Image (cartoon, rainbow, N blue to C red):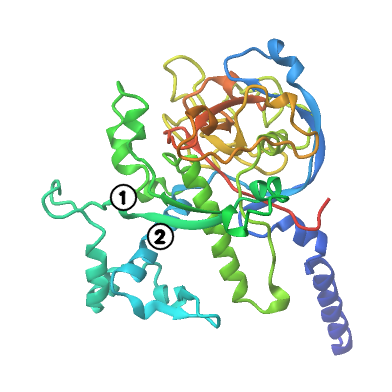
Amino acid sequence: MDNKYKWISVLGLLVIIAIYGAVTPQEALRRGPYKGMVYIPGGTFNLSTTPQGISMMDFNQNSRQVTITPFYMDQTPITNEQYREFVHWVRDSIAVKNHGLADYLKTGPNGEEYIDWDQVYGRRSSLFSERNRSDNPNIQSAWEQFFYPDNPNFYMKREYNTHLFVYQYAWYDLRAAIAARNDETKTREDFIRRTAVNVYPDTTVWVADFSYAQNEPMVKAYFSHNSYNNYPVVGVNWNQAQAFNNWRTKKFEIEQAKKDENERIEINPFDLATEAEWQYAANGNQGDLAYPWGGASARNGGGQLLANFKPGRGNYIEDNYAYTSPVDSFFPNDFGLYDMAGNVSEWTSSSFDESASTFLHDLNPVYRYNSEEEDPAYLKRKVIKGGSWKDTQDFLRNEKSAYEYQDSARSYIGFRSISHALGAN
């Protein structure tokens, strides 16, 4: 081939790559701000709220048309591996600030103190890698602070004192501030809430939830063993899920600050979906579906189960998983979301109230109540959605809702994050 035509062919190929390889603003919007999240476009659907165990016929009056604006949502529930990164970050932060590792602390331009995470980890994934501990006696000493003393050890195995893993953060109670906007006696400080959360999952839930079942192996291995990395984290209460979202937001902002200014992405903070957003996402923008995959059955034409749940009394293993399953084991819905039915139920940001459907707005409806520690238990109820590995088929329906207390952890409740889209309608 003549050199002239070779160059024309090469230039033509480059033009095609430029056209089809370029990321349009619309495509960038759909890719979302974070790996593993998908764009959920806004839309209108019929929001139904049927308590678990109650037939749909008795609660048809709770169905109403509402509109949801766009957001990004995790494709899967948060996994043990993802949540373990949070736990280790909390542990390492405490080590740097409280246990003699001040060399990793830096001072910002306004006098603020922060941890230099690039220096903490360098090329290693853990501050307390075996090499770090052997090379630096200060790191070894800090590492020792996180274990129970020698006496409580069993079988020569050292165990974390998980009560030490506390994440502290502040957040602004915007709704309370708006409600008191005409009160001249209030200052901004009155609406800043400071929260301290023990972030380690409650691994004892596997026995506590099922007193007469042999689940001790799950207590010992489910969160800590690498075999369960891609399984949904459980034993996490609502407060811990919100602490994770606060940390995830900060982590994302730190990552963006390292980029060139024209490459940075701004996002709304990570949060839990409202009950309405969760149900809309489960429907996959396909109208009013009984299940995320559509149809009236939880089996396909060949009789195979379409989610991880209990198909009958005492029958847990028909879907090949006695407990939870890896988060991408079954087909996603039309939005590309996995496990919107079965595997684990999921926390939402909505507070539970039996009469909520009578006063919710029809645009982005939500009932939220930020409970105080001294509040009665009924004010600490949060809506959970999706059904779980221990539930039968009826509990997996999109419109089914249940509740759990925000300070309670269960072996069948996990969560996933969302971030509300900026500049999208």
Residue ID at (27%, 72%): 139
Q: Quadrant of residue 122?
A: bottom left
Reply above or below: 283 against 50: below
Kind of residue at disc 2: Val
Q: Nearer the viewer, residue 281 or 374?
A: 374
Q: Which x, y percent locates residue 97? A: 36, 70
Q: Residue furthest front?
A: 185
The residue to which callout 1 is attached is 163
* Amino acid type at mark 1: His
For the question of whether residue 127 can be seen, the reply is: no
Q: Position of residue 416 (x, y in %)?
A: 57, 45
Q: Label 1 neighbourhood size at 10 Å, few (<14), some (14-19), many (20+)?
A: few
Distance Cα–Cα, label 2 vs label 1: 12 Å
Q: Residue furthest left?
A: 151
Between 365 and 359, the one nearer to me in the picture: 359
The foreground one among 360 and 18 is 360
Image location of residue 95, percent across then percent down: 33, 67
Q: Is residue 53 above or below residue 171?
A: above
Establish if 83 lies above or below 133: above
**Left or right placement of residue 87 versus residue 352 in this view:** left
Q: Quick one: 111 or 339, which is closer to the camera?
A: 111
> Which residue carries the number 2 mark?
90
Circle 2 sits in a helix, a strand or a loop, which is it?
helix
Whichever of callouts 2 and 1 sits on the residue coming sooner in the sequence is: 2
Q: Identify which residue is drawn at 69% across, 19% down.
A: 296
Tag shown at residue 182: none
Q: Position of residue 265 (x, y in %)?
A: 69, 67
